[in-house]
Image: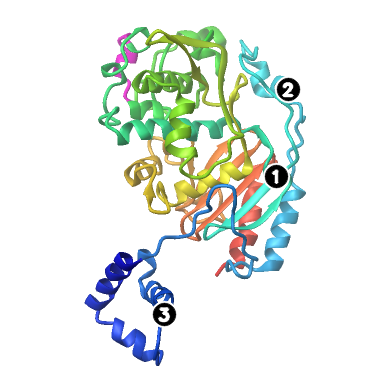
């Protein structure tokens, strides 16, 4: 404590306010612990580490203590509970009833599982304010998986495995997948922003089989867009990013994520990240599974709402957890910068540019969003994270946020 107190005291002395701090409070005797509290309280807000929950526990605050109106919190939670997704809880049945089930090649490649109850969490200033449903239950999170995938790419960027997001993927990932004239132009940024128009087949799914438009034969034969010019949401290309990231790391991506993100932020040991039954490759003499970026054909991240909230809090804190920079602030800046689609950053950061996606939320907010709906709402303006699982629409989540912010201080 002595070293820490000396550093704090020197900072305050240089600001010429230590004497005034003590004299203004008529302090005659202050213990070392009390002095530390006084000194830390006098530090500017940006110098104090915001609260982050330790492993296996999460401190709670009543809505009023967290600067929220208790009646409006109750109303927001009630509104969320009344807005459950009407889709089947059997997620494989839901797959075949959705647009995915009407695609040319709809057969699942990975596991589906029945989902749980509508669930949500409200976190303000890092503290739990409200929970409902089954916050500890692990469920498929669909395309929120993409945010974990882009995080693994971010870790590679931070460590120099990816030198620059504008670097061609082919420069560090040899092989057929980025060898064609078109695919050789693709950069990491193109994959991350879903603007690559990557062409090929991966794990038995051709790129044209994902959300084809118009006549299928014409769609197959269409001219390719120059990489970086057109945004197209496509899960085959997301899986190409997962494979490329695996090649760069040369390690299973769930291990990379666990050691470098999920363990440092105190996530539980219940989450799992799956690929497909056929997405195995031989890497350095061992069989390794390449991950999927969602549950379009099954698989992806299976995780609890509480662990989702921890991840949302990490991105809210610009990649910092307590005193540790888990993911670089530069990566969060890049991920939340719009591209060709000005409502989308890196996958899967849905931005609120022009407040179009969520009119009640600040423009600086974003969402990690997946089908179902599974959503992590992140609001750095109001220091707020909200997880909503199996809510029927983004519009309904906007209604929740509108009530929370109406009473926020």
Q: Is residue 126 above or below residue 253?
A: below
Disc sitting over residue 119 in the figure: 1
Circle 2 sits on which residue? 97
The quarter of the displayed image where residue 286 is located: top left
The x, y position of residue 285, in whole percent, is: 40, 7
The quarter of the displayed image where residue 298 is located: top right
Question: Where is the N terminus found, in terms of image quarters?
Answer: bottom left
Q: Is disc 3 surrounded by few (<14), some (14 to 19) or many (20+) residues within 10 Å?
A: few
The number of callouts visible is: 3
Q: Residue at x 58, y 66 (%)?
A: 66
The x, y position of residue 84, in whole percent, is: 74, 42
> Which element type, helix, strand or loop, lies under badge 2?
helix
Which residue is at the front of the view, 279 or 237? 279
Mark 3 vs mark 2: in front: 3
Q: CA distance from mark 1 to mark 3?
A: 46 Å
How was the colour assigned to the protein in this rendering? rainbow
The quarter of the displayed image where residue 14 is located: bottom left
Residue 275 visible in this rendered orientation of the protein: yes
Write down the region rendered in magenta. Answer: 179-187
Question: Where is the C terminus found, in terms of image quarters?
Answer: bottom right
Circle 3 sits on which residue? 31
- Decide if residue 59 is on the left or right side of residue 114: left
Q: Is disc 1 surrounded by few (<14), some (14 to 19) or many (20+) residues within 10 Å?
A: many
């Amino acid at each position: 404590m002595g070293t820490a107190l000396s550093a704090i005291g020197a900072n305050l002395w240089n600001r010429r306010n230590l004497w005034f701090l003590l004299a203004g409070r008529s302090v005659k005797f202050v213990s070392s612990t009390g002095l530390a509290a006084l000194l830390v309280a006098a530090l500017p807000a940006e110098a104090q580490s915001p609260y982050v929950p330790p492993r296996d526990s999460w401190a709670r605050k009543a809505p009023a203590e967290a600067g929220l109106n208790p009646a409006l919190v109750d109303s927001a939670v009630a509104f969320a509970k009344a807005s459950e997704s009407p889709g089947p809880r059997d997620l494989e049945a839901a797959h075949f009833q959705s647009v995915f089930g009407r695609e040319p090649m709809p057969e699942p490649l990975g596991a589906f599982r029945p989902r749980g109850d509508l669930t949500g969490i409200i976190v303000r200033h890092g503290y739990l304010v409200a929970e409902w449903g089954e916050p500890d239950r692990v469920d498929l999170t669909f395309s929120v998986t993409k945010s974990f995938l882009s995080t693994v790419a971010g870790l590679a960027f931070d460590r120099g495995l990816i030198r620059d997001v504008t670097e061609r993927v082919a420069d560090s990932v040899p092989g057929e997948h980025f060898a064609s004239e078109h695919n050789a132009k693709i950069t990491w940024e193109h994959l991350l922003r879903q603007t690559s128009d990557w062409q090929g087949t991966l794990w038995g799914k051709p790129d044209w089989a994902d959300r084809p438009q118009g006549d299928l034969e014409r769609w197959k034969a269409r001219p390719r867009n120059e990489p970086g010019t057109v945004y197209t949401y496509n899960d085959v290309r997301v899986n190409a990013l997962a494979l490329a990231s695996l090649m760069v790391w040369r390690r299973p991506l769930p291990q990379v994520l666990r050691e470098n993100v999920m363990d440092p932020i105190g996530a539980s040991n219940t989450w799992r990240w799956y690929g497909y039954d056929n997405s195995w490759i031989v890497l350095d003499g061992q069989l390794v599974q390449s991950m999927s970026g969602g549950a379009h054909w099954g698989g992806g991240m299976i995780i609890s709402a509480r662990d989702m909230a921890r991840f949302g809090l990490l991105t809210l804190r610009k990649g910092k957890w307590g005193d540790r920079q888990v993911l670089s602030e530069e990566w969060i800046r890049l991920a939340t910068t719009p591209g060709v689609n000005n409502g989308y950053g890196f996958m899967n950061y849905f931005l609120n540019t022009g407040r179009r996606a969520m009119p009640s939320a600040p423009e600086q907010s974003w969402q990690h969003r997946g089908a179902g709906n599974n959503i992590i709402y992140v609001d750095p303006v109001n220091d707020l994270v909200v997880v909503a699982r199996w809510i029927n629409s983004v519009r309904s989540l906007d209604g929740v946020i509108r009530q929370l912010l109406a009473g926020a201080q």
